[in-house]
Amino acid sequence: MSALTDHLIRRMAVEGPLTLADYMGDCLSHPDFGYYPTRDPIGAQGDFTTSPEISQMFGELIGLWLAEVWRLNGEPKKTRLIEIGPGRGVLMRDLLRAARMMPGFPDALSIHLVETSPVLRNKQQQTLEGTNHSITWHDRLSDIPDDGFTLLVTNELFDALPIRQFQMTSEGWRERLVIHNPAEDNFGFVLAPGPGPAETLIPKAIRSKAKPGEVSEIAPMGWAMARNIAERIATSGGAALIIDYGYDGPALGDTFQALRAHEFADPFADPGEADLTAHVDFGSLAQAAAGGGAAVAPMSTQRDFLQALGIEMRAASLMHQKPEEQKKAVAAQRDRLIDPDEMGTLFKVLALHQPGAPPLPGLER
């Protein structure tokens, strides 16, 4: 029995069944036994690969996007560039390289990374060594002063924030809770015996149409983070870019899943040894951001956004006068980022800006 499994069993013995959010929170973020604090999960040797790891084009285009937003807003001399959940630092490294193309932009920046994993902080330090920028690490977004123009980016963060699930029954909504079954020595779902106050958070748009057996997911932690980001943008000025996989909801459906060694796995097997995620409800996220006072740009797919930023031209530049094998590799990377059968349409782009500020590049419609 792993230390995290023992911890969960002991916790359930005291508290009873856990919400899915509590289970996910312990599995992913327990400071001693959790998934993220204890390993580098990204890349071929890990459990999943993110867009920045696929190709430099992703980070470079975002860097140019940030630089253009800065220019359109009057080139503020004091600008905080923030990334929440920076992975191994590859996105920040690539976007900073591209940012050098905008005169004055790199000199205006102070770099802030929000990361709680000691393992990933160490990876980020290695990746960003030699970027000629002073970088400050923080445990929380709230630790970063909001006294300057803000440019914030986060990629594949919201899918890993804990969710809660509810199932419609013949007697109404019941929360899906996690228990440990001693007889079979495994974890699984059980329905709460009665209604609870959290059910009021289920979006009204789907409450009335759900049929028995159907599942609704809510993400209070994600909503709170989106609102906090929006409040910062609305107050200090700037823009935020949120990229993740999900849907324009709200919608019914169970999207809770686990990834291990780049394959889907049982989310209740070997707690703390797999990445637990859920698809992001971008409609609810946008609503939470609007509640924080920010203006919400029209949502886009990753495909449309990267194409608007010029990924085709950047790919052609990288392929120019290169051997055929390298050309094929660049083309494959481009296609993985934007092909509808790959990441192109599953991944969405949500951007926020200060009300009254110029429209955001690539998201003007």
Image (cartoon, rainbow, N blue to C red):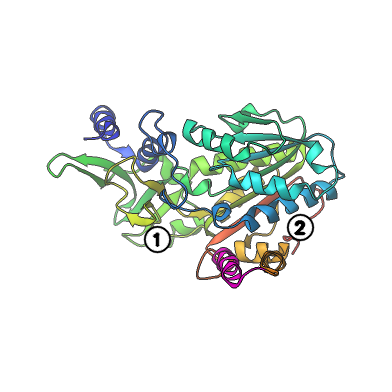
**Residue 210's disc number:** 1
Placement of the C terminus among the 4 image quadrants: bottom right
Which kind of residue does numbered mark 2 sit on? Pro
Image: 65 above or below 92: below
Report the side of 364 relative to 270 (left or right). Answer: right
Residue at mark 2: 361
Residue at point 70%, 69% (across, down): 320
Residue at point 60%, 65% (across, down): 330
Which kind of residue does numbered mark 1 sit on? Ala
Q: Report if residue 145 lies within the magenta region.
A: no
- Residue furthest to the right: 74
Residue 255 in the image, given as x and y percentages of width and height: 40, 56
Q: Main secondary structure of the magenta part?
A: helix
Dot 2 surroundings within 10 Å: few (below 14), some, or many (20 or more)? some
For mark 1, give the secondary structure: loop
Image: 19 above or below 307: above
